[in-house]
Structures are given as C-alpha cells and as structure tokens.
C-alpha cells in the first residue's frame, strides 16, 4: 500500500486511540473500565472497517487478496470479543446506583428503553457473524474465491458484522455523550 | 495485448489435457455447503434465544429471576451499590451461547455431507437476521410480545 495511505490510517488511529486513552484521566472512579471499553471498541471498529476494505477484491476473485485475510478476520473477532466483554464490564456501572441508566431513565427514558436495550444485543452480533466468517475462511479455504455463491455469502457475513458494529459504536457514543459513567 | 502463438493446433493438445484434469480434481474437492449453513443457522438460533430471553425477562419478576439463574456463574451478575451488576443479561448471554454451540454441533454433524443452494440461503439468512434485529427494537416488538404473552397466559 502507498505510504501516504499508511500515514492517513496511522493519523486517524492515533487520534481515535489517543482520544479513548484520555478517558484514563477522566474524573470518574470508573475511568479504567471506560478507557478499556473505549479502546477495545475503537480497535473493533478499525479492524472491521479494514476487513470490509479487504473483502472487495475477494468478491472480484483476486487471488492475492486472500493471503492475509484469515489473519485479519481473527483480529476482527478478537477485538469485537474484547469490546463485548469490556462492554459487559462497564454495563455493571451503567446499571449501578446513580449510574447512567438511572439518570437517563429520569431525564430521557427513550434513550434507555429503546436505544440501549437495542444496542446491548446488537453489539454482540459481530462476534457471532465474524466467527462464522472465520469458519468459512478456514473450512473452505481458497474455494471462497473460486465459488461465486460462497464468496457472496462470505462477504455478506462480514458486511453485516460491520454494520452491526457501526450501529453499536454510534449508539455507545450517543449514550456516553448523554451521561458518562 | 494478447500474445499470439503460431504453433499448429495439435501442439496445444498436451497443454489442454492437464488443465481439464486439474479442473475435474478441484470440482471433486469442492466441499458441500451444509457446514456453512449449519454455522450460520446456529447464529440465527443464538440471536433468537437472546431475543426471546430478553422479552421474557421483562414480563414478570419470576421469569427474570429464572433467566438470571443461568448467568449466576458470572461474577459480574452479582454486586450492589454504585458498582452495579449485569443482572439477567449474563443469563441471556449464557443461554444464547449454549444454544449456539449445541445447534452448531448438531447441524454440522447432520449436514456435513449435504449440499444446499447457498444463493437461496443468503436471502433467507439476510431476511431472518433483519427480522431478528427488528425484534430487539422495543417500539415494534413490545406490542407483539404483549399479545403473545397474553395468548400463552404468561401475563394476565
């Protein structure tokens, strides 16, 4: 890849990771939970998005695109799993006494009753879908490139995982802006 | 630019033969689509479990306690005060994981040699996933859940 593209990726990633890293200094007793969940979610979004960029050549049957793809898939599963587990960790405080849930229910109940109830399950979907994509990549190997119906299903799995990750990420950001832990 | 070869057609024959043989070999090695359908259908089952347990846990305190019990092995399910707990969410996740694992293994064993039409399954899978996603959207799902719960006598 061109050097300027790597520079751009590096810049955006450092802004995102640096921004989440700042949470460590946020004046809240739950700053570590918040930073761990923020960082793992940023990495989950970054790996899933990069994966989506890599699958376009797969759909077109470009053999060279296959080489590192299974490794990127595993990275995406790992980061999405980390985001889900850290999400469970910070969810404790969300529900805790005087936590964001109590505040949101008192001031803007729709954000909990609709958005959060939706987000807490949608955010688990990428782990499921990407695990199936990993299975597909290892079980069928390069057949995924050769067989049109297989590559279409494979790409659909990854695209769906990315869309759910994005919805989860946007709702998480909204809730954190509304009331921080 | 295409490279032109000026050799007579008979000279091509030996090169064509191995290609045909290779193609036949790769077709023979083609793995059936059964295992992929098993893997993706089990995901739909797991998500369906999440949806059903989530709506059940909101109906009555008894049902919420029952679902909580499945996730009681997770330390984060317990806890009080500002630190909070994940409540019955751990039970929903545990049940979904069990359903996922059990259905994946059994469908895989049953269908590992079968070949299905993946193109048709892609449409079914996408539609089912979209429908299940809407099932987590309370303004849409709640009226249906309430009708079903009354019909089954779960609530009065």
Image: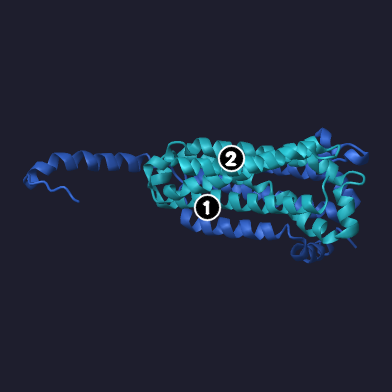
Chain colours: A cyan, B blue
What residue is shown at x 33% (from left), y 40% (from top)? B26
The secondary element bearing badge 1 is classed as helix
Q: To which residue does mark 1 refer? A: A156
**Parent chain of label 2:** A
For discs 1 and 2, the disc positioned in front in the rendered view = 2
What residue is shown at x 62% (from left), y 40% (from top)? A14
**Parent chain of label 1:** A
* First in residue order: circle 1 vs circle 2: 2
The secondary element bearing badge 2 is classed as helix
**B89, above or below A106, in the image:** above
What residue is shown at x 52% (from left), y 55% (from top)? B121
Give the side of residue A72 with respect to residue A92, left or right. Answer: left
**A36, above or below A151, in the image:** above
* Label 1 crowd bin: few (<14), some (14–19), many (20+), radius 10 Å: some
Give the side of residue A104 with respect to residue A124, left or right. Answer: right
Q: Which mark is residue A76?
A: 2
Circles 1, 2 touching at the beta carbon (< 8 Å): no
* Label 2 crowd bin: few (<14), some (14–19), many (20+), radius 10 Å: many
């Amino acid at each position: 890849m061109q050097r300027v593209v790597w520079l751009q990726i590096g810049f955006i990633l450092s802004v995102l990771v640096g921004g989440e890293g700042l949470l460590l200094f946020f004046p809240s007793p739950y700053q570590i939970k918040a930073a761990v969940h923020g960082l793992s979610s940023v990495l989950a979004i970054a790996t899933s998005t990069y994966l989506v960029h890599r699958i376009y050549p797969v759909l077109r049957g470009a053999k060279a695109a296959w080489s590192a793809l299974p490794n990127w898939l595993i990275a995406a599963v790992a980061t999405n799993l980390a985001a889900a587990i850290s999400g469970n960790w910070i969810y404790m405080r969300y529900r805790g006494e005087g936590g964001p849930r109590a505040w949101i229910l008192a001031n803007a109940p729709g954000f909990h009753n609709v958005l959060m109830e939706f987000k807490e399950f949608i955010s688990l979907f990428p782990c499921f879908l990407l695990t199936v994509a990993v299975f597909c990549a290892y079980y069928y190997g390069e057949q995924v490139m050769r067989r049109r119906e297989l590559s279409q299903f494979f790409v659909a799995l990854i695209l769906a995982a990315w869309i759910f990750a994005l919805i989860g990420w946007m709702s998480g950001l909204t809730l954190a802006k509304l009331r921080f832990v | 630019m295409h490279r032109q070869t000026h050799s007579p057609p008979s000279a091509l024959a030996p090169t064509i033969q191995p290609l045909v043989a290779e193609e036949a070999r790769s077709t023979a090695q083609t793995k059936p689509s059964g295992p992929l359908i098993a893997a993706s259908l089990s995901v739909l089952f797991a998500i369906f479990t999440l949806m059903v347990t989530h709506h059940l846990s909101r109906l009555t305190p008894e049902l919420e306690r029952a679902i909580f019990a499945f996730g009681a092995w997770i330390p984060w399910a317990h806890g009080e005060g500002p630190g909070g707990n994940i409540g019955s969410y751990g039970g929903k996740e545990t049940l979904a994981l069990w359903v996922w694992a059990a259905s994946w293994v059994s469908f895989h064993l049953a269908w590992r040699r079968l070949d299905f039409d993946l193109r048709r399954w892609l449409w079914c899978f996408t539609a089912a996933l979209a429908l299940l996603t809407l099932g987590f959207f309370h303004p849409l799902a709640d009226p249906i859940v309430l009708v079903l719960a009354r019909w089954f006598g779960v609530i009065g």
